[in-house]
């Protein structure tokens, strides 16, 4: 497949890093920042361009990976060059209706909400396309995202907002928990390298145990909490400080922001 990324930032780099491990893709990236272009070219061997190519054809896949705030400007510049290419947008919030309007009515559009673990082939991507999209185009979008992790097709476009606040933004929630535990370990007296190693091994082991167990995750937690013991005291503090409530409220706020971004940026 011939895939041109527009925007070579964090998320594009994560997808490119995963994709280049598979043979058979011709990958280009359009990125205004020369330092990022150099890294993309040197580390991943992709062609890195400073500006949009003059034209695309119906064999091309164009993957929009710019910030939602830059999307309209980029789409308006793309519209006369698109040549019927399949367009994939990974931008949060902005819907197919606005994208199609900015792209002079093109309907070969798929929305994808990926996440950064794509970089190590462990991404999760939610995909949505309208009924007008052909089976071949669905298969092409699915194949690109499957190369970097799991793919979930969503029934309606609001599903993109739903998945954004879980798997799209979720790695940041997990990294926040990891950061907190590393800080706790260092305050206990471990040096940074030891703290990082201990915490990552603990996450790794806990996730693997949850994956291999067929009991609820809450049961696995309770199995650690000996009656009158140490863990019980820690979880009691988390509950008293509303940690679970805050995580759930954060996810709700995240979803609200996704919808808000769509409204803010799609008006005209
Ligand atoms: N980061 C994540 O985990 C996820 C991000 N997304 C979505 O991915 C998109 C990109 O996010 P992210 O990678 O984090 O953002 P970044 O800012 O890291 O990447 C965007 C890149 O686009 C470049 N850019 C700006 N204008 C243009 C242009 N006209 N043509 C080509 N490139 C341009 C920027 O360059 P410069 O910095 O020089 O302006 C920057 O390198 C967003 O829409 C976001 O919603 C979706 C899921 C997860
Ligand atoms: O924070 C953001 O807006 C993007 C979308 C999902 C993850 N990062």
Image (cartoon, rainbow, N blue to C red):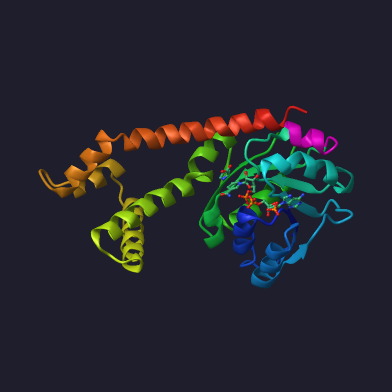
Quarter of image, res 98:
top right
Q: In the image, what residue occupies the spot 63% across and 44% down?
A: 112
Whether 37 is among the magenta residues is: no
Residue 82 left/right relative to 40: right
Q: In the image, what residue occupies the spot 51% across and 44% down?
A: 169
Identify whether 225 is placed above or below 118. Answer: above
Identify whether 96 is placed above or below 19. Answer: above
Q: In the image, what residue occupies the spot 43% across and 52% down?
A: 175
Helix, strand or loop: magenta stretch: helix
Quarter of image, res 110:
top right
Quarter of image, res 147:
bottom right
Magenta segment boundaries in residue numbering: 97-105
Identify whether 88 is placed above or below 194. Answer: above
Residue furthest to the left: 228
Quadrant location, the C terminus: top right
Q: Ligand 2: which quarter?
A: top right
User: Residue 135 at what x, y percent from top left?
Assistant: 71, 44
């Amino acid at each position: 497949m011939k895939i041109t990324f527009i925007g070579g930032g964090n998320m594009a780099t994560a997808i490119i890093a995963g994709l280049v491990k598979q043979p058979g893709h011709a990958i280009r990236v359009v990125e205004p920042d020369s330092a990022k272009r150099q890294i993309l070219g040197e580390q991943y061997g992709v062609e890195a361009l400073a500006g949009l190519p003059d034209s695309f054809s119906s064999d091309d896949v164009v993957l929009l990976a710019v910030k939602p705030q830059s999307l309209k400007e980029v789409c308006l510049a793309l519209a006369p060059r698109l040549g019927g290419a399949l367009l994939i947008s990974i931008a949060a919030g902005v819907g197919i209706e606005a994208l199609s309007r900015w792209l002079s009515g093109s309907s070969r559009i798929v929305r994808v909400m990926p996440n950064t673990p794509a970089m190590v082939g462990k991404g999760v991507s939610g995909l949505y396309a309208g009924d007008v999209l052909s089976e071949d185009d669905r298969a092409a979008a699915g194949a690109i995202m499957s190369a970097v992790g799991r793919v979930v097709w969503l029934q309606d476009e609001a599903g993109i907002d739903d998945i954004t606040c879980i798997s799209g933004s979720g790695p940041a929630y997990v990294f926040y928990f990891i950061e907190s535990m590393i800080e706790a370990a260092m305050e206990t007296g471990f040096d940074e390298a030891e703290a990082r190693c201990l915490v990552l091994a603990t996450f790794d082991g806990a996730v693997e145990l949850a994956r291999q167990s067929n009991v609820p995750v809450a049961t696995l937690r309770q199995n650690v909490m000996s009656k009158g013991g140490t863990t019980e005291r820690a979880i009691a503090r988390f509950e008293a400080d509303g940690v679970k409530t805050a995580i759930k409220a954060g996810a709700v706020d995240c979803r609200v922001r996704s919808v808000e971004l769509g409204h803010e940026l799609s008006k005209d």
